[in-house]
Image (spheres, coloured by chain):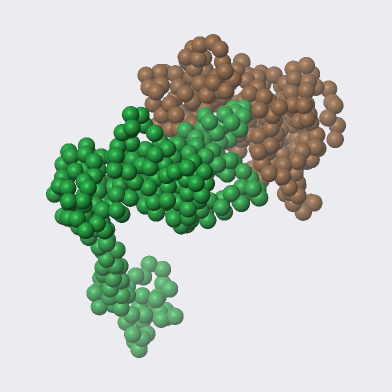
Amino acid sequence: MDCDGQNGKDVVIDCCINDLHYGSFKAVRDTHIPIKKQKITAFIGPSGCGKSTVLRCLNRMNDIVRGFRFSGHVHFGGRDIYHPSIDAVAVRRHIGMVFQQPNPFAMSIYNNVAFGLRLNRYKGSVAEKVEEALKRAALWNEVSDKLQKSGLSLSGGQQQRLCIARAIATDPKVLLMDEPCSALDPISTRKIEELMLELKTHYTIAIVTHNLQQAQRVADETGFLYVDTSEGGRTGYLVEFGDSKQIFEDPQQQHTKDYIGGAFS
Amino acid sequence: MAVIGGQLKPDLPAKFAGDSNMPGQINVEELEKSLLKPRTIFNQLLIVFVTVLTLTALVPLFSVLWMLLWKGGHNLSLAVFTQLPPSPMEEGGGFGNAILGTFVIVSIASMISIPIGVLTACFLSQSETGSGLASTVRFAAKVLTGFPSILAGVFAYGALVLTMGGYSAIAGGVALSILMLPTIVLTSEEAIRMVPKKMKEAAIGMGATDTQLMWMVLLPTAIPGIMTGVMLALARAAGETAPLLFTALFSNYWLGSSGHIDLRQPTASLAVLIYNFAGAPFDNQTSMAWTAALILVVMVLISNLIGQLFSRRQIN
């Protein structure tokens, strides 16, 4: 597929997947998504269409899965992060990730946020950075008086914001969010969505979501992935990518129209 | 169908009334308790049976504890902890050197087995499922769990006592470390594997290297489980006699009686003291053996309780 299209200078991650296998299982094919600077890019699609897999490609989280094979490239700042000379660990320090289940460490709130700074042997004031990250994640007011309490003592929504604070404490260029609200109640979801819109001014965000309204509310650009069963397996591929407004109001492909219209889920 | 057209067939026994496929029809009588039903009787019988057997299983433990308290309790005094073992015919005395010796030997064993065991567990827990080396090591550890303790003693005798030119606390520690190692390896691996996968993912997603992942996330989270394993291994090692007979032997004197603490000398331990004194023909020595056994059981109990405390904290 053509991956050398006109990607403006504002593309931070140019993701171009030809084939992606787990062992002999072909999980994703022909997916090209340019992720633009300080924009929110959403991946939508039915369950099992590989949208999380694509997201996890962007910071090489799939490397820890056995049998993972990848053909294509993911350009980050002009370099292919799958090039043999690239250290996956270093990539993940620039491209942070927030997971579906809130996953704070079994340590204090403070140490959770300071974790990434310690990984990087941060030289400046850790306390300042922790406070800044918690403020950015809109959690500071709720936890400023109990920073030494366990991160696990917080509610689900707070835990997820803690995870966001942890991810942004090291100032990553890009924040990947894998269905960050699917385990949360509507109020916490709203908070996280507001937070994403605020974070957009500093970071580039890519988000996987099951929730179409959420994509509509927060995303600047949206990619719709669908499952292709023609080759026997369940292989995900990108059907349509574009401005969120266009995808939701004027989808060009029949599959997209059906999905947005609620014909299937 | 017992019910046709909403009417009960008169020739059917009443209990089939409940089999009706009519929605909303419940035979209330079937819900009532009855002690005469076969399944109720069977149930009650099994409950009694299981309870009796459970209590039977506790008999050995409590009878031993009772005997220890009865025969060894009256000797308990400060002298027991501060004085040396009595010679034949002598009255009084204690076994302070054996308590100290047990601590020293078990400490040496811990210093050897805890680092090796925990690091092995780190390796095993991070190995992939199909790894040949890991499954060999795991299998070896499981075999070692059932390793006869006397063989550990013979091994340390051959490897250390013969080469170092005598019985020593070090040889005793090495023998016990062999017995502690498999418990520590297997429980620590389990504890590390129990750390939720999502925490592991979080650390990897932050850009942690394998070492940082282990050192900053997995080990701190698994510490309660690891401590439980260590305490259980300690409790087992403290009570072993056979390996010490070949290695540390016994001594009637304090560890540092020659002016400085020398770990290359024969060293007293509670287990060997009990072994020596229990069969002695002198009353004072036999009653010392009872008291020593009581102290040993209490020590083992305390380390088990500490282990429990850790594992409970892990659950919370």
Judge whether B125 appears above or below A165 on screen. below
Closer to us: B77 or A195:
B77
User: The chain coloured brown carries which letter?
Assistant: A
Q: Give percent across and percent down for residue A87.
A: 71, 27
Judge whether B140 appears above or below A153 on screen. below
- Is residue A177 shown to the viewer in this render? no
Closer to us: B17 or A78:
A78
> Residue at point 79% right, 40% down?
A19
In the image, farthest residue toward the top: A124
The quadrant of the image that shows the C terminus of chain B is: top left
Left or right of B181 in this view: A224: right
Q: Give percent across and percent down for residue B262.
A: 39, 34
Q: Give percent across and percent down for residue B108.
A: 42, 38
Judge whether B94 appears above or below B50 on screen. above
The quadrant holding residue A222 is: top right
Q: State how many labels appear.
A: 0
Left or right of A63 in this view: B182: left
In the image, farthest residue toward the bottom: B11
The colour chain B appears in is green
- Is residue B2 shown to the viewer in this render? yes
> Residue at point 74% right, 26% down?
A86
Closer to us: B297 or B311:
B297
Left or right of B56 in this view: A137: right
The quadrant of the image that shows the N terminus of chain B is: bottom left
> Residue at point 78% right, 23% down?
A79
The quadrant holding residue B226 is: top left
> Residue at point 56% right, 50% down?
B138
Q: Give percent across and percent down for residue B75.
A: 15, 47
